[in-house]
Image (spheres, rainbow, N blue to C red):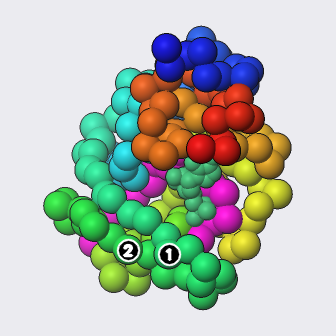
Amino acid sequence: MMRDDVKKVLFTEQEITERCRQLGKQITEDYKDRGNDLLIVGILKGSLPFFAELIKYIDLYVDIDFMIVSSYEGTESSGSIKISHDLGTEAEGRDLLVVEDIVDTGLTLSNLTEYLLSEKKARSVEIVTLLNKPSRRLEEVNIKYCGFEIENEFVIGYGLDFNQKYRNLPYIGVLKEELYQH
Ligand code: IMP
């Protein structure tokens, strides 16, 4: 079964839920005086479970929307992004909160932030990520809210995939090494 492929659990479902509660409370506090005009943008597919859990704890009249974004590999710091699904909600002049599963090289979010500010004319763009892997950073990303910082190891579960699988694990874990060879 799928769960037998996990070498170790890094963060349990309870730990993630508790962190979402804390982050949601902080976000509520930070945005409560800004006119309830917050647009929360989930980056599919990886942010889906985190997004669903986090927004339960944001006690504001927010809008939600989703984007499908990927970064081109191999272009290093000049990397641009491919947007295969864009916002359907007006973002001009609004405060945006981008929800991501993990910040790794930072290419995706640095380019996306730039796009949302210059093309979509958002008033502000802040980032909330479930995980941060700072050791792999190629481009600076200003992360306002972070669930957990992790070492440079490949993680799966709670939205994060390996070859599109394991997104439905209810916790974050590390795969058994032998499974990477395939
Ligand atoms: P980057 O910050 O532009 O390098 O890209 C972040 C994206 O890479 C994330 O949204 C994930 O889809 C993927 N990613 C990076 N590290 C991991 C990992 O450890 N497990 C699963 N996906 C990862």
State the image coordinates of residue 15 (x, y, percent, origin top left): 64, 17
166 displayed left or right of 75: left
Instruction: Look at 33% across and 70% down and name the residue there.
Output: 83
Residue occupying the far front of the picture: 182
Q: Which residue is mark 2?
A: 82
Above or below 94: residue 148? above
Identify the mark nearer the N-term, 2 or 1. Answer: 1
Q: Which residue is mark 1?
A: 72
Q: Nearer the viewer, residue 61 or 182?
A: 182
For the record, the magenta segment spans 92-107
Of the 4 image quadrants, the one containing the C terminus is: top right
Residue 105 shown in magenta: yes
On the question of residue 99 being in view, the answer is yes
State the image coordinates of residue 153 (x, y, percent, origin top left): 76, 44
Residue 18 shown in magenta: no
On the question of residue 47 being in view, the answer is no
172 displayed left or right of 42: right
Is disc 1 placed on a helix, strand or loop?
loop
Instruction: Look at 63% across and 65% down and name the residue there.
Output: 106
Counting every numbered tag in the picture gives 2
Residue occupying the far left of the picture: 88
Asked if the residues shown at circle 2 and circle 1 are in contact, with their CB atoms under 8 angstroms apart, the answer is yes
153 displayed left or right of 74: right
Is disc 2 placed on a helix, strand or loop?
strand
Q: Quadrant of residue 78?
A: bottom right
